[in-house]
Image (spheres, rainbow, N blue to C red):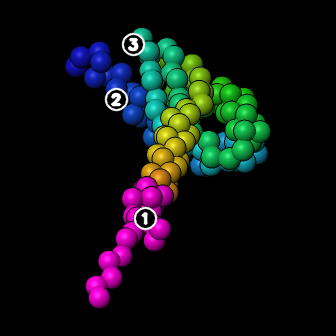
Amino acid sequence: MAPGRRVERVAALIRRETSELLIHGIRDERVHQGMVSITNVEVSGDLQHCKIFVSIYGEEIQRSEVLEGLEAASGFLRGELGRRLQMRRAPEVHFHLDRGIEKGTSVLNLLEQLEQQRETLGEVQSESDQPTTDETTTVNKT
């Protein structure tokens, strides 16, 4: 089996097990203040380091507290991952905030605003194209 394939499999297993541990294993109240989603897991080629990217729904203060709680639980997670995955040495776990969903939402909001502006300008443009009553001439036939 190619080393890249093994790293991908381990990353997928870490993602699955970490998701399970986030729901049932971690008792730190800070972690449960916001909705946490694991968006990506990157494992180094030697399987010694693991970056877990999380998206946290909530205010900025909640995000920082949840991230602190996750970092505090990283030792527990490392031990549990070692036991569950039956690895000789479990990788060091590092959590990173993934802001991709936030950026995507802001881009969608900007596109929506542009569409509304176009519609508004289109209505103004179509009104200015129509002649006013002063500009029209009427011809009276006698």
Residue topped by disc 3: 45
Please tell me whether mark 3 sits on a helix, a strand or a loop: loop
Give the residue drawn at x 72%, y 39%: 60
* Residue 35, image x, y percentages: 62, 49
Quadrant in which residue 1 is drawn: top left
* Residue 37, image x, y percentages: 54, 43
Residue topped by disc 1: 135
What amino acid type should be assigned to the residue bearing mark 1?
Glu
Instruction: Tell me the CA gap for discs 1 and 3.
Output: 76 Å
Q: Please check the rendered image and state whether residue 124 is part of the magenta-colored stretch, yes or no.
A: yes
What amino acid type should be assigned to the residue bearing mark 3?
Gly
Q: Main secondary structure of the magenta part?
A: loop
| Other residues around mark 3 within 10 Å, as few (<14) / some (14–19) / many (≥20) | few
What amino acid type should be assigned to the residue bearing mark 2?
Arg
**Camera-nearest residue between 35 and 113:** 113
**Camera-nearest residue between 98 and 47:** 98
Dots 2, 3 in contact, CB < 8 A:
no
Residue topped by disc 2: 9
Instruction: Tell me the CA gap for discs 2 and 3.
Output: 12 Å
Q: Which residues are magenta?
A: 122-142
